[in-house]
Amino acid sequence: MPQKSITNLVIVKDLLDIVGGQDAVILVKLCEKKRKRVTDEELSKKMKKKVTEVRATLNKLHYRGIACYQKTRNQKTGWYNYTWEIKKDRITEIIEEQQTEMLEKLYQKKNLEADYSFFDCEKCNERALFEIAAEYNFICPTCGGSMTSANDPNRQKELGVRIKKIEKELEILGIGEGKAQKLGHICKP
């Protein structure tokens, strides 16, 4: 069974687009298809882009460790030739770092929402704990607007859905299996 390309995943496309720009996904797919080191000139021809544009994208990816190159000197011309390779492991590392951080924040938010009562200001959307809102007689200390209860049972469900989505994405990438459950236990008070 042929291995699926990780560039088909939305989360990977988003990362590559942020790191290397709109051409990064196409460039990574081409390198992935080639399965060996490729020159920037070859990529330029296949992408129908200027070599300088391809090099700029490759350099952006190189900065984050996604693309790496090997430099050889042409004995006749004295010029250097660069052959590039994409490190899929680095892509998964970056995504794992980002998603782990996001999971930590979501678990903390979910636990906070479960354990405390919050009140929101109707004017400026300032959020305060029950104790603080009660201290100010449910009048916003920032703008003077009235504060109403912000406890919404659907919010807990939404946070749970977002957590499950990230866990599934990590599972598809083959990383972080069991990590999300560990985070859930670590982040619980």
Image (cartoon, rainbow, N blue to C red):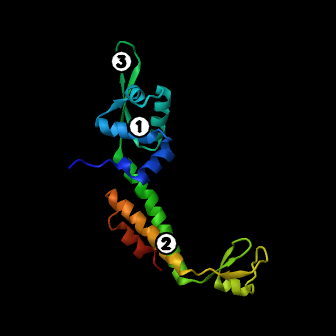
Q: Residue at coordinates 36% horizontally, 36% vertically from top-left?
A: 30
Q: What residue would you read off at disc 2?
A: 159
Q: Position of residue 151 (x, y in %)?
A: 59, 81
Q: Amino acid at mark 2?
A: Leu
Q: Amino acid at mark 1?
A: Leu
* The disc label shown at residue 74, or none: 3
Secondary element type, mark 1: helix
Q: Amino acid at mark 3?
A: Asn
Q: What residue would you read off at disc 1?
A: 27
Question: What is the crowding at mark 2: few (fewer than 14 residues within 10 Å), some, or many (at least 20)?
Answer: some
Secondary element type, mark 2: helix
Front-most of 83 and 4?
A: 4
State which tag comes first along the sequence, 2 or 3.
Answer: 3
Q: Are marks 3 and 1 in contact (CB under 8 Å)?
A: no
Q: Residue at coordinates 41% horizontally, 37% vertically from top-left?
A: 27
- Residue sitting at the far left: 1
Tell us which disc is closer to us: 2 or 3: 2
- Residue sitting at the far right: 144
The answer to whether 159 is drawn above or below residue 15 in the figure is below
Q: Position of residue 55 (x, y in %)?
A: 46, 31
